[in-house]
Image: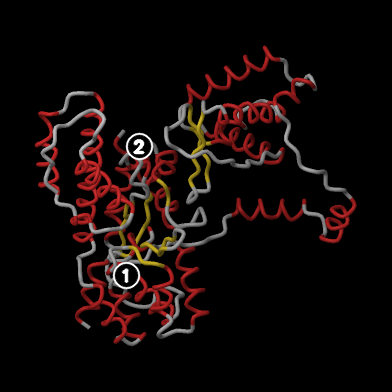
Amino acid sequence: MEQEEAARTERKVKKAAQMLFFRRHNLPGVKGWELKKALGDDFMEIIEVLNSIIHKLGLEVRRLREDEAKEAKPENDRFVVVLKEQMTDKASGLRIDELAMLSAALAYIISKQGKAPRKSVEDFLADKFPRRRVTSAIERYIRQGYLKEDEKSLFIGWRTRVEVDSKTLMDLILSS
Amino acid sequence: MMPHTHTHTHTKEPDDLLRLIQFCKTVQSADIDPFELDVKSSLSILKAYIKRWKSIDDLLLDGEAISELTKVIELQCKWIRDRAASFYIDPALIELKLRLMEPVQLASVLLKAWHPIVSLDSLTTERLKQSIEYWNALLPLCERRSALEAEPIPEAGVLGLNDLLSLRILSQTEFKEELASVENELKMRGKTEYYDFVYDTDNFEDSVRKAYLTSYLVSEGRAELDIEPLEEKIFITHGQREGVANRSVPLALSYEDWLKWNRKKRQEQNAK
């Protein structure tokens, strides 16, 4: 009986790993309700087991609340696997100038309490990079989820909230 | 903003209360620092008036002032929360630091604070099979183009309920019964994915009919569509939230999608 239970858990953990590591939609990550549908009501326990396994590899499952208006329950949240520790080498296709623009844009917006007019961000980045490249970089960051935009302003996007340790970023900039 | 000492009547409303309400509204709409309003002294103005209130209008005015004050207090809470969450630092200082940093330094600090999402793309046998089926079913571009050019594109139009009744596709009684049946089904199922709801039928004609009835329920405010842009999914629920702006959402149905949906459902049932 115990063996059956262990085999069942192992199967579910493998399934959870596949769902979380491999992209299923346009955006990375899986919604809680998808995990529940695939793994059953005890999906949070399965995620915990997976978490304990991937911790050893320097990875972790992170849960993100996407919509503050919705009830706070795991089904409504997005689950992603992130690198737990600091990156030791290149882990992205972004070029150094693209990373620099992203870093400056994020720090600039964070310092303005998470919201800044798009034009002011563009003007700020255009001090060091050609405006055409600044515009296309901002568009890309919006598409990737690092920034969010309404009619006039830019905000910190969901992906920045998951991936970037804002406090560390600001501390490093201040101490540079 | 001290209260006036005049005797309050129903026709004359105290100016300082009106000013207070107006100021609260300005704070909410004009991006003014919410701490510009002294909540404590505003409350003492209200307190000074409280024994003089007699009519319903007085109480409504008092209620409005309290409500507007509450909204300002909420903004003050948000202001504190935002600053605490963003480790408030003078933006001018950050701007100066950023201007002085080289692009390489900027990239380097981001890398130190970055915990990227692990996300891989991989082909599966099932996906390859689907793509081959798609490729095989796809006509050469020249044939598709000539077919597209040959067929005159019919002008898009909308069939209303009256059109369906006049075409005898529906009768008034039948329509009401069917509408009630779809509404009951929606009520029973709770929040569900739109296509799971409309494609769950024995034939495609029924799905089209169900989609039409569903759109009628949505237009009537008896059901609500909830679009999740991140997941690219559309959910439907019975009832409607208040204060949600109305907008039109075009939703496509196709026989191929209906077939796929039912095939998948059968596979899931067999697997169980």
Nearer the observer, B115 or B167 = B167
Q: Which residue is mark 1?
A: B114
In the image, what residue type sits under mark 1?
Answer: Trp
Q: Identify which residue is drawn at 86% across, 61% down.
A: B142
Q: Residue furthest front?
A: B6
Name the residue located 17 percent from the left edge and 31 percent from the top edge: B8
Q: Could you say where residue A85 lies in the image, as x and y percent from the top left?
A: 27, 68
Q: To which quarter of the image does residue A33 belong?
A: top left
Q: Mark 1 — on which chain does it sit?
A: B
Of B244 and B114, nearer the camera is B244
Secondary structure beneath disc 1? Answer: loop
- Classify residue A72 as left or right of residue B242: left
Return the residue at label 2: A4
Compared to B250, does B37 lie above or below?
Answer: below
Colour pattern of the rendering: secondary structure
Judge whether B32 appears above or below B72 on screen.
below
Q: Outermost residue toward the top?
A: B173
Q: Locate residue B117 relative to residue B168 in the image: left or right.
A: left
The front one of B113 and B9 is B9
- Local crowd size for mark 2, using a 10 Å CA cut-off: few (<14), some (14–19), many (≥20): few
Label 2 sits on a secondary structure element that is helix
User: In the picture shown, does residue B95 fall above or below B191?
Assistant: below
Q: Disc 1, disc 2: CB below 8 Å?
A: no
Q: Is residue B14 left or right of residue B123?
A: left
> Where residue A69 appears, x then y in whole percent?
35, 43
What's the distance in space between the residues labelled 1 and 2, CA to CA?
Answer: 40 Å
For the point 33% across and 42% down, the residue is A74
Q: Is residue B59 visible?
A: no
Residue at the farthest right position: B150
Q: Name the kind of residue labelled 2 in the image.
A: Glu
Going 72% across and 37% down the picture, which residue do you hit?
B255
Name the chain under label 2. A
